[in-house]
Image (cartoon, grey):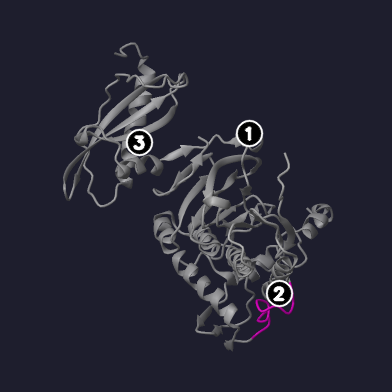
Amino acid sequence: MDGMAPARNKLWLIVGVIVIAAGALFLYRFSTPVVQQVGTTSAPQTQDIPDLAIAREVNAVASYETPGGTDKVRFTLSLDSEGAIVDVKTTDVLNGEAVSENLQKFSQGLLLLIRGKTLSELKSIDRVGKSSLTTAAYNSALPDLQKQL
Amino acid sequence: MEKENSGFTFEGIGTSWCILVDGEPLRQDAKERVLDFIRIFNARFSRFLDNSEVTAYREAGAGEYAISEEFALLLARAEQLRRLTGGMYDPAVGGLLEHAGYGKTYCLTERPGLAKFVLPKWHISGSKLAIDGPVVFDLGGMGKGYCIDRVSRILEDFGYRHYLVDGGGDMYGTSKLEGVPWEVALEYPGKPDMAAGIVKLRNEGLAVSDIFRRRWKGWHHIVDPHLRSPIMHTVGIVAAAGNAWDADCATSAIFLADESRHQEAAKHFGSRYLVFRADGTAHASHDWEGELFT
């Protein structure tokens, strides 16, 4: 039980969970989502493969009214030691916490902070997708053009 | 570590190309056919050439004009984009870009007369173009994807099946031998030495659009034709679709459409997409596949 978390971190987590849940609600199509219960249970779950970067997990359950009935979705947030969200997992509470494909897509609908990797770290790249470069002519004209600025 | 086949590289339609073929060399006659096609396309559709098809109406009067089949094909697609983006994508901004300094003489400062620019009206019907006065078309954001697909068809004509056609960072790839996908890193918008993620291309087109490549004095090449000012909220879009033209069109549509219409725009071209924002965050469509370096 994680009863030792500082109050500030807990508040931040609650805000984060509500933002995540609200974002997922907005993105869930073909349903009229109604949040009946959003709360934090700060019980860290042990992982099969220990990851030192993940300090703990918190989770919240949101309920949705869909044409087919009520859905309950659990959002599990993994946080690093600074309290930053490093992973979001969505599972189907009514289906034995199965990671359903549809729900997994919510995680991708959320905003992700892209840290990136240097190209030199990537070993087997064939090409780099990027927006197009200017012509050689433009580049050679650049010094003259810049004088005009 | 140099690869055995580092690709057939050349310049064309204002950008650098690279064609990779897996398992065999690219024949000289195939290369020449590709170069010929690109040269001809440039002559026909470059905004920077006086007698191209897109500048032919620079001093024209209102009326209806018969145009080539290929120009009609391109403009029909442009009209779809105009509708999907609520008028924000419009190749008739060619004139506006010239006023902003992004014209034939590459002057990097805004020129007087900018405030007076009104977007010309145009309409395509079959192979007839109707205009209300002088207009210059810029097929940027779309012409390159079309060319990449045409070049791919040339390779197919010559019997090649395992290739990747890279036209300035947009591309189409079938696969390497034995169906192994081509691995493409996605450049981090604004950071040329960084990758934001990886896409595995297998019979797919990929297009990338960002605001950084052509940038000067607060303007950039994606302009809002109605406000006459640059688009600021999104810094990059990546789209993958069945071919390069669809991917290219999807990036233009998503970049310029209202956020509420992103999914509609993407669905129209059968594409999945990634949107990069100025704060370093990204939003992926629900069907996005590929690793993102979060």
Is residue A127 toward the left or the right of residue A23 in the image? right
Q: How many marks?
A: 3
Can you see residue A145? no
Residue drawn at (49%, 69%) of the image: B82
Kind of residue indicated by mark 2: Ile
Amino acid beneath label 1: Glu
Secondary structure, mark 2, is helix
Q: CA distance from mark 3 to mark 1?
A: 31 Å
The residue under label 1 is A121
- The residues tagged by marks 2 and 3 sit, at their Cα atoms, a distance apart of 52 Å
Asked if B120 appears above or below B4 in the picture, the reply is below
Instruction: Identify the residue under disc 3.
Output: A20
Q: SS for tag 1? A: helix
Is B125 situated above or below B254? below
- Is disc 2 in the same subunit as disc 3? no
Crowding at mark 3 (Cα within 10 Å: few <14, some 14-19, many 20+): many
Which secondary structure lies at badge 3? Answer: helix
Residue in the image at 63% along x and 80% along y: B134
Sequence-wise, which precedes: disc 3 or disc 1?
3
State the residue in front, A36 or B225: A36
User: Real-space Cα distance between discs 1 and 2?
Assistant: 40 Å
In this image, B143 relative to A89: left or right?
A: right
Q: Residue furthest left?
A: A69
The residue nearer to you, when weighing B44 against B180, is B180
Q: Pointer 2: what residue? A: B40
Camera-nearest residue between B23 and B125: B23
Region in magenta: B49-60
Q: Main secondary structure of the magenta part?
A: loop
Q: Is residue B55 magenta?
A: yes
